[in-house]
Image (spheres, rainbow, N blue to C red):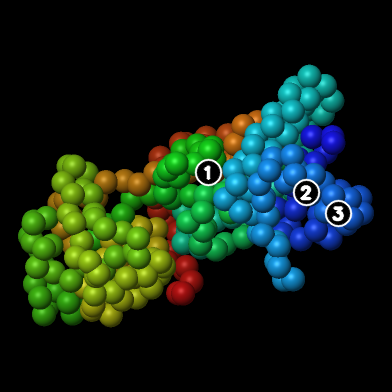
Amino acid sequence: MDRLATMMTFQKVVKYANFTTAADDLGISRTLVSRHVADLEAYLGIRLLNRTTRSVTPTEAGLRYHELCSRVLGDIRHGEEEITAIKNEVEGEISILCPIWIGSFGISVATAEFCALNPKVGVKIHFAEPSSNPHEFLAMGFDVCIQPNVLRDSSIMVKKIGQIDHILATSPAYIAQHGAPAQIADLAVHQCLAKTTETSWTFANGERVPLPQPPRFSSNSVFALREAAAGGLGIAMLPQGIIQGTLAQGALVHVLPDYPLASRPLYVAFPPGGDAPRKTRALISFLADWFKARGGASRSLASIQDDTPRT
């Protein structure tokens, strides 16, 4: 059994969730792909894939082995690139998974500038909420994932490229009915609207406010929270980049302006080990420098108007 060949085959099967597509990509028969996977499972003595008539998904052991394959094959590829150094130009397509709302913070502008500087590079950005599984963007075929959350207990590599400033906001109607909190402790008697996974708000002074569970209104979309706050349901923590226009129009007002919230980092996630090819490393470095030169994500596009979608 050629271990490297079977590892590569397994990696492709997980990526495409399909034996036939993996075979087409590798230029081998579907039968050989099935044999490679069967040989691996027999060698390791454990099932790596769950197979049904409609889907192929990795088991827990399969996910761990996929991480191993990514590290080993990535290290080999990275080492060969450095040794041979045949090509010095950055080229090829880079696919990026990015949350919809983060598109308001300069990702599109920055990647367009990267393309302009590297004419042999193509960028494909897909805007969608990343899965809670930190490895899923790789299985979906993306090279990198723009991520506003720390990826804990994961072998996925991350690099901080900026930060996102948030503010607390609500509608004038809510203030008229309930009054405005004068200090952080006053939030305990107000309706707080939160992201689905959010349990507290942290301020720049280190003070942390636990949120009532379940909150009156929650969503995984900051746009939904923005609309709920503008509708008078309560106070929401929102990224500055998506509410500038709403604040200017008077539909939202800044709550507790003398108590700024702690800034949240913006990361780019990429494969473990040496699995990031030269084009990806170049993009990551460019994004970090781009945001640093503009003082972070929230302030980089302060002049952008609130034209983000309402979802």
Q: Is residue 66 left or right of residue 245?
A: right
Task: Please state which of the two labelled residues, at mark 2 or mark 1, is closer to the viewer.
Answer: 2
Mark pair 2, 1: CA separation: 31 Å
| Residue 90 % position (x, y) | 74, 36
Instruction: Tell me if residue 221 comes above or below residue 32 in the rendering.
Output: below
Q: Secondary structure at mark 3?
A: helix
User: What residue is rendered at 52% in x and 58% in y?
Assistant: 130
| Residue 224, image quadrant | bottom left
Q: Does the residue at mark 2 contact the one at mark 1 (Cβ under 8 Å)?
A: no
Q: Is residue 66 left or right of residue 99?
A: right
Q: Could you tell me the amino acid type at mark 3?
A: Ala
| Residue 50 % position (x, y) | 67, 59
Mark pair 3, 2: CA separation: 12 Å
User: What residue is rendered at 27% in x and 46% in y?
Assistant: 262
Q: Could you tell me the amino acid type at mark 2?
A: Val
Q: Is residue 115 left or right of residue 254?
A: right
In the picture of the structure, the residue carrying the numbered disc 2 is 37
In the picture of the structure, the residue carrying the numbered disc 3 is 23
Label 1 crowding class (10 Å Cα cut-off): few <14, some 14-19, many 20+? many
Mark pair 3, 1: CA separation: 30 Å
In the picture of the structure, the residue carrying the numbered disc 1 is 268
Label 3 crowding class (10 Å Cα cut-off): few <14, some 14-19, many 20+? some
Q: Could you tell me the amino acid type at mark 1?
A: Val
Mark nearer the N terminus (3 vs 1) = 3
Instruction: Tell me if residue 44 comes above or below residue 220 in the rendering.
Output: above
Res 170 seen here: no
| Residue 3 % position (x, y) | 79, 34
Mark nearer the N terminus (3 vs 2) = 3
Mark nearer the N terminus (2 vs 1) = 2
